[in-house]
Image (cartoon, helix red, strand yellow):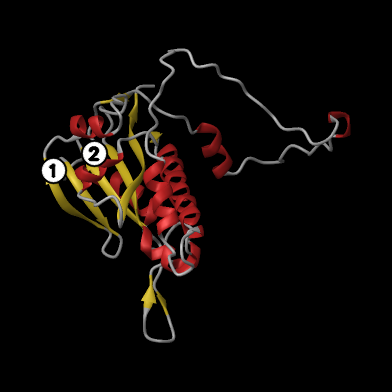
């Protein structure tokens, strides 16, 4: 039994123990079955009228696809700026009564605590050297961390997935757990995951609007990816990654 004052151990234990599974079934054809829940007889279904118009957001939702084939094409740096600004950038500065302030982002965040950090792996982006960067939300800029062509290294971290290697950008979302767990305890772990999903959806829809393809990737080797990013895997750890580039079609 964990003591009541321990607000983090349970969440971190779950995080550590929800790493990539070891597949015992080596079948290459997993059985797919679509299931739907019905709580009443379908004859009692209340039909809803079709929308009278199709707003831009709906058009983007209908157009979004998981892209697994990219064209090796240079991306303008302005395009990267738009992607990052819409994904997790500050939208304004809020001043508090005690003189402190915080920067609301483009996603909802439990308690306005914003536990996510954004790491950007680039190749073929105009005027920006290939490499790994940390996104500075305050200055809307990139902090260099590692230089060079890193997509092959990243591929090994992402469980050997290689369908993104011709993309221009891979954004990795990490979490500074204590920012949220210190206030909400173990429940805060759920809030952190919600926020990562909000940010990734922002990125996918903005990419779609710009004619870019995206691929959300939740499969990765935690230790390898954390080491690649320079994270300890406990206080801060990788959660999710999204590749973005020019689709072949």
Residue for point 44% across, 29% down = 66
Q: Residue 200, percent across and down? A: 42, 45
Q: Residue at x 28, y 25 (%)?
A: 162
Q: Residues within 10 Å of mark 1 (few under 14, many from 20)?
A: some
* Residue placed under numbered mark 1 in the picture: 129
Q: Residue at x 41, y 15 (%)?
A: 26
* Residue 84, disc: none
Q: Which residue is most to the left?
A: 148
Left or right of 185 in this view: 247: left
**Is residue 182 visible from the viewing direction of this image?**
yes
Residue 109 placement (x, y as % from top left): 47, 61
- Residue 95 is situated, as x and y percent measured from the top left of the image, at 41, 79
Q: Residue 206: image x %, image y %?
A: 42, 44
> Which element is circle 2 on?
helix
Asked whether residue 91 appears in the rendered view, the answer is no
Label 2 CA crowd tier, 10 Å (few <14, some 14–19, many 20+): some
Task: Please name whichever residue, 204 or 5, is drawn nearer the observer in this view of the structure.
Answer: 5
The quarter of the picture where residue 127 lies is top left
Q: How many marks?
A: 2
Left or right, 120 with respect to 149, comes to right
Q: Which residue is mark 2?
A: 224
The residue positioned farthest toward the right in the image shown: 44
Nearer-N-terminus badge (1/2):
1
Q: Give the image quarter of residue 226.
A: top left
**From mark 1 to mark 2, how far is it between C-alphas?**
23 Å
Relative height, residue 33 to residue 8 (above, below) = above
Q: Of residues 184 and 202, which is closer to you in this image? A: 184
Q: Secondary structure at mark 1?
A: loop
């Amino acid at each position: 039994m964990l003591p009541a004052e321990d607000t983090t151990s349970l969440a971190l234990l779950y995080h550590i123990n929800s790493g990539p599974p070891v597949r015992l079934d080596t079948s290459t054809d997993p059985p797919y079955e679509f299931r739907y829940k019905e709580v009443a007889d379908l004859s009692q279904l209340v039909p809803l009228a079709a929308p009278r118009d199709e707003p831009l957001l709906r058009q983007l939702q209908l157009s979004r696809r998981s892209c697994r084939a990219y064209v090796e094409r240079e991306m303008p740096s302005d395009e990267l700026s738009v992607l990052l600004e819409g994904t997790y950038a500050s939208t304004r500065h809020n001043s508090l009564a005690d003189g402190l302030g915080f920067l609301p982002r483009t996603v909802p965040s439990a308690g306005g605590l914003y536990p996510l950090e954004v790491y950007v792996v680039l190749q073929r982006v105009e005027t920006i050297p290939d490499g790994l960067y940390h996104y500075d939300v305050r200055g809307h800029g990139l902090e260099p961390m590692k230089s060079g062509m890193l997509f092959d290294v990243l591929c090994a971290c992402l469980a050997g997935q290689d369908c993104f290697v011709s993309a221009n950008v891979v954004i990795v979302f990490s979490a500074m757990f204590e920012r949220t767990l210190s206030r909400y305890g173990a429940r805060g772990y759920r809030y952190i995951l919600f926020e990562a999903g909000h940010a990734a959806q922002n990125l996918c829809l903005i990419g779609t609007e710009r004619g870019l393809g995206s691929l959300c990737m939740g499969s990765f080797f935690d230790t390898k990816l954390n080491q690649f990013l320079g994270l300890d895997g406990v206080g801060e750890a990788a959660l999710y990654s999204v590749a973005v580039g020019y689709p072949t079609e």
